[in-house]
Amino acid sequence: MKILIVQESDWLERNPHQQHHLADRMAVRGHEIKVIDYPIDWSKDKKDKKNKKNNSFFYGRKVYENIHKVDERANIEVIRPNFIQKPILNYISLIHFHKKEIEKQVKEFQPDVIIALGLLNAYIASKIAKKNNIPFVYYLIDVLYTLIPEKTFQSIGKKINKKAIANSDLVITINEQLKELAIELGSKKDNTIVIDAGIDIEEFNPNLDYSSIKSEYDINDNDIILFFMGWIYTFSGMAELSIELGKNKEKYPNMKILIVGDGDDYEKIAKIKDKYDLGQQLILTGKQPYTKIPEFLASADFCLLPAYKDEEIMQDIVPIKLYEYLAMKKVVIATDLPGIAKEFGKDHGIVYINEAKEVLKTAKNIIDENSYSKIADSGRNYVKGNDWNKITDNFENTLFNLIDNNNS
């Protein structure tokens, strides 16, 4: 089948999410896939004065061939339409140019189905799909309108979200909490399904050798590694945890924080490291290739998600990395957030806290109580059925059924 995916995030630079895993695997199965994306971090890129292209007023259309994120055999085409690199004008121009690009792809590519993960271009795509009798799928993996940086636009974003959902033939979410949200936003219960996040059980092997990571980052056998990976949002809790370790480094001499990734709070955490002279107790690797993530995970003892408990963005989501953490037989310490608690409950590898400052004490208690192995084993057992091959089978069959019903 031919699949057109539209989103308002950066397909190339952002870490792999659900759509990347599924798209790569679908491409390997022989399906033809095109993605229309948007360089969401353009305003940050413009601060790079050395790059003249980043500082231009007009961002020119780009096409990237043979793209893959998690499987090098995949050959996805990513199309990045024009837009104006100025606040407010970026949204107005996105509406115009993404509409033109979606219409162009409908005419030339003739997709069998359109899958949307954005807001503005999702609504545009839903109308174009309806006009051309193409099945339209809204894929809800985040509470998108809460991610709009301009707070005043979030209510508008929510209304657009509702309209795109109302135009959908099918709404797919990645957990039960998001399914409930989709229904609250107007999705019909019978047309709303959950397709869980997946893991590559063979790749995320708890017994993976990580000696090269130990050597490169000066990790000793008696060190307790507190691991975080991904985009470091301001509400991630990692700055607060770093300060807590800085204030108590003599009390926890064997504990080290290992952060793999970059993001909004990276520079802030780097300054915290210097201020408290944390040295090798706070390791910042920056962004790393996805292929190295299993090795980094193998080096960890505890995996963290200590995000702010009252952060609206975090209430309904279940990050895919939690499945990878648990698959690697690691104890996860996470804030007690509704989506995560509903998805995993208790006694399934996750220990809940109220704030990031509790991570150090919680980790120490688990070690002192000798309960680590029991918790870690329960997490691995809970997620081992979420193999990507099964998830992709479900996704593929769902799309085939939708297309068949539309044509009948």
Image (cartoon, rainbow, N blue to C red):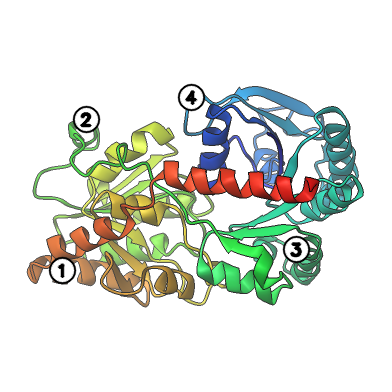
- Do the CB atoms of the residues marked 1 and 2 lie less than 8 Å apart? no
Q: Earlier in the sequence, mark 1 or mark 2?
A: 2
Please tell me the numbered disc located at residue 72: 4
Element at badge 3?
A: helix
Q: Amino acid at mark 2?
A: Ser
Locate residue 125, reporting x and y percent: 82, 48
Q: Amino acid at mark 4?
A: Glu
Q: What residue lies at 37% left-to-right and 77% top-to-bottom?
A: 354
Locate residue 14, reporting x and y percent: 56, 42
- Do the CB atoms of the residues marked 3 and 4 lie less than 8 Å apart? no
Element at badge 1?
A: helix
Q: Residues within 10 Å of mark 4 (few under 14, many from 20)?
A: few
Residue 99 placement: quadrant: top right
Q: Amino acid at mark 1?
A: Ile
Gap in Å between the C-alphas at discs 3 and 2? 47 Å
Q: How many marks can you see?
A: 4
Residue occupied by mark 3: 165
Residue occupied by mark 2: 212
Element at badge 4?
A: loop
Gap in Å between the C-alphas at discs 2 and 4? 23 Å
Q: Earlier in the sequence, mark 3 or mark 2?
A: 3
Locate residue 242, reporting x and y percent: 34, 60
Q: Residues within 10 Å of mark 2 (few under 14, many from 20)?
A: few
Gap in Å between the C-alphas at discs 3 and 1? 43 Å
- 142 or 396: which is nearer to us? 396
Q: What residue lies at 28% left-to-right and 67% top-to-bottom?
A: 348
